[in-house]
Amino acid sequence: MIALVVSILGAYSFTRIDYPGSTTIRRGIIVVYMLAAITLVIPLFQLLVQFGLVDTRLSLYITYTVKTLPLTLYILWNYFRSLPVEIEEAAFIDGYSRLETIVRVIVPVSLPVLVAAFLFSFKIAWNEYLFASVFLQSESLYTLPIGIETLDSAFQNVWGEIMAASIITTLPIIVMFLYLEKYMVEGLTAGAVEG
């Protein structure tokens, strides 16, 4: 969710505000998006050790935000480029500030894309294994993928339990998609009908 809020502001600034270095930042985001997660483990781990955040939930919040931010920024940046500037100009004429324009105009118009970006980033964070396995040591903080792996190594031949845990792990994503799908479809088809 943090990545989505930051992405809304960042993607809007990339498409509507001209400032020095914006092209370099956009290219950097694309490069980071293309990097494999394994290349970020050591630098992030060193930062977390420096700040004393290893083996805390905050370490996962930070790393999951770092991991999902390039994707959500890229999705929203491409969508915001397609929005007509005239919508915002009308909001400015009505007296809205730039932040009010984002909250009251851009976000409602972009709801289908925001839902899609949220689903993608949630799925990435929910199923993430690498960062959690490196940054966490306490069993009480383990995420579900780590817990399933621990179940496999702690006992022998517990395939039924592992499969049941895997299905339980996928249920929240399925439920969220089924619930949020209607918002995506409504938003995508809203402009297709006149009147």
Image: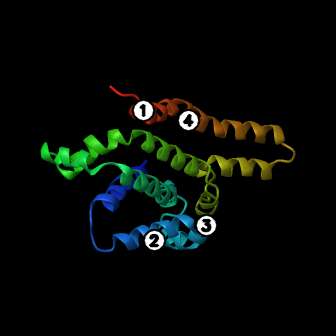
Q: Nearer the viewer, residue 163 or 68?
A: 68
- Mark 1–mark 3 Cα distance, whole angstroms, equals 39 Å
Which residue type does callout 3 highlight?
A: Ala
The residue lying toward the viewer, choosing from 78 and 6, is 78
Nearer to us: label 4 or label 1 = 1
- In the displayed structure, does residue 128 sit left or right of residue 81? right
* 3 or 2: mark nearer the eye: 2
Q: Which residue is mark 1?
A: 192
Gap in Å between the C-alphas at discs 3 and 2? 14 Å
Indicate left or right for 90 with 7 as reference: left
Proximity of marks 2 and 4: CB atoms separated by less than 8 Å: no
Mark 1 lies on a secondary structure that is helix
Q: SS of the residue at dot 3? A: loop
Tag 2: residue type? Gly
Task: Kindly identify the residue that appears in the image at 50 percent across and 33 percent down.
Answer: 180
Q: Which residue is mark 2?
A: 28
Q: Nearer the viewer, mark 1 or mark 2?
A: 1
Q: Earlier in the sequence, mark 2 or mark 4?
A: 2
Q: 149 or 96: which is nearer to us? A: 96
Determine which residue is flagged by label 4. Answer: 177
